[in-house]
Image (tube, grey):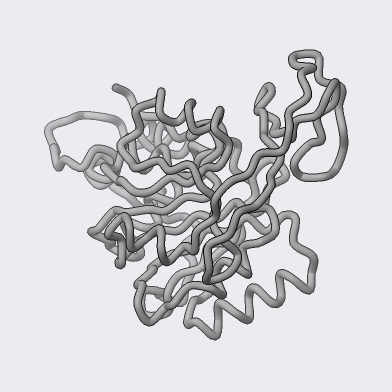
Amino acid sequence: MLESFEELSASLGAILYLVLEIGQRKFFEYRALDGKTYSSTLHLEKFLNWTGLLIEFDPHLLLNILEMHRKAYAIRACVSPTATPMVKLVAPVKIIEGNIYTGYRKKHTKLDGYRSEKDDFHTEFKQSIAVECFPMYSLLIAANMTKIDLIVLQNYGNDLNIITSIPFDEILIFVFLIEVKNLSSDEKLALRLSMELKKYAFYDSISYQGSVFWLLIKNEFYTGKKDENILKKLTTTDIYKILTGFDDSSINYTEVDFFDQISRGFLIQ
């Protein structure tokens, strides 16, 4: 089990680089939240020179993203579960000590629906906000991203509808990373079958602090074998190149120390 989203992103980066040998390095992430705490793409952006599109509808969280100066476009919107735009009323979100809460007076309901907690940090009542929702296809076309390496969906339940609305004959997507924790068994089965029909192979199930992600890879880029020790087979030069984008064999990191860095999601600056 991974211990941080940065470790998830580091491991994901190695898989994408070695298994798929992808060159575009473009991602689409929804929801982006604050762009840091639960980001599956931040490490890719910081250390692997990726860029992409971050979608978040909460204005306060979007402001956090903008203040980070991430090397990606950030848009205040939601992704429509259909092929047509719409306006939805949504509850604002607050991240408190790493937990995600929807906002109410004196209480925040945890987004995963498992429990409610008294909020000692904030007691102001937060009204629902109206937000414009656009089809994923429209957002990708607007960003000139018709070929995209990675789509991350952390939409807590509407992912299947979003995927169903994508015209796969017009958009080339290599890899999906989908949060499935809140899906029922029937919904997971429907998602798996839908992706198989769209010619995506199930590569792995990744767990992180109670969250569960599915990694699905387009068939023609799938080797058919999951390499459990993919990082450990890298040489020091390989790892340095993956993390920085430069091939400098003169740098003397010990293989053990450097593997420890990448596996924990960190890089010596």
Q: At 51% from the left edge and 39% from the top edge, which residue is drawn?
A: 39
Q: At 26% from the left edge and 42% from the top edge, which residue is drawn?
A: 49
Q: In this view, does 203 lie to the left or right of 148?
A: right
List x then y, in percent, for residue 143. Answer: 31, 55
Quarter of the image where one finds residue 68: top left
Q: At 69% from the left edge and 47% from the top edge, which residue is drawn?
A: 89
Position of the C terminus by quadrant: top left
List x then y, in percent, for residue 1. Answer: 63, 46
Q: In this view, does 42 lie above or below 160?
A: above
Q: At 61% from the left edge and 60% from the top edge, which residue is drawn?
A: 205
List x then y, in percent, for residue 120. Answer: 81, 14
Quarter of the image where one finds residue 97: top right
Quarter of the image where one finds residue 94: top right
* Furthest residue toward bottom: 197
Which of the two residues, 7 or 118, is positioned nearer the viewer here? 118
Q: How many marks?
A: 0
Q: Is residue 228 left or right of residue 181?
A: left
Q: Is residue 151 above or below residue 255?
A: below
List x then y, in percent, for residue 245. Answer: 20, 42
Which of the two residues, 9 or 129, is positioned nearer the viewer here? 129
Which of the two residues, 137 or 210, is positioned nearer the viewer here? 137
